[in-house]
Image (spheres, grey):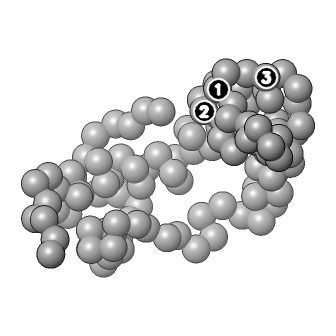
Amino acid sequence: MTTPRQDPVIWSAPGAPGPVAAKDLQGYEHDGFLTVDQLISPDEVAVYRAELDRLISDPAVRADERSIVEKQSQNVRSVFEVHRISEVFAGLVRDERVVGRARQILGSDVYV
């Protein structure tokens, strides 16, 4: 048994302009997620991975209260507010390819 949703999934008006096609919005509304092939190029992915590796091995980041480090393995599991710690990730959260899709789904400006 499922509970009927009280709030909309897509907050923008039907037909509102944006980078997501109507059929993809319908899929998002039904499935709860959106996939976009090649949204980020392989070269960009390499930059983000390198930055991630740098962050998780940086003692200052590991010691930061915004980082969650597993006690046994010492693996970094989460870094909250990563866009405030890393200019590379700050650029990603401001990237119009990402922000435009979020804005279209939410029907308003977005912030992190």
Query: Which one is closest to the eye, mark 3 or mark 2?
Result: 3
Left or right: 2, with 102 as reference point: left
Q: Secondary structure at mark 1?
A: loop
Relative horizontal placement of residue 35, taking residue 86 as reference (left or right): left
Kindly identify the residue that appears in the image at 79 percent across and 23 percent down. Answer: 63
> In this figure, which residue is indicated by the disc labeled 3?
63
Question: Residue 39 sits in which quadrant?
Answer: bottom right
Q: Residue furthest front?
A: 72
Marking on residue 54: none
Residue 50 seen from this side: yes
Whether label 3 touches label 2, CB < 8 Å: no
Could you say where residue 87 lies in the image, as x and y percent from the top left? Answer: 72, 30
- Is 90 or 75 nearer to us in this picture? 75
User: Looking at the picture, which amino acid does disc 2 mark?
Assistant: Phe
Check disc 1 and give the amino acid type: Arg
Looking at marks 3 and 2 on the same chain, the residue that comes earlier in the sequence is marked by 3
Under circle 3, the secondary element is helix
The Cα–Cα distance between marks 3 and 2, rounded to whole angstroms, is 13 Å
Left or right position of 101 against 3: right
What's the residue type where badge 3 is placed?
A: Ala
| Pointer 1 residue | 66
For the question of whether residue 22 can be seen, the reply is: no
Q: CA distance from mark 1 to mark 3?
A: 8 Å
- Residue at the image point whose x is 15% and y is 75% from the top: 1
Residue 109, quarter of the rendered image:
top left
Image point 80% across, 43% down: which residue?
Answer: 72
The reply to whether dot 1 and dot 2 touch (C-beta < 8 Å) is: yes
Closer to the chain start, of discs 1 and 2, is: 1
The residues bearing labels 1 and 2 have C-alpha atoms spaced at a distance of 5 Å
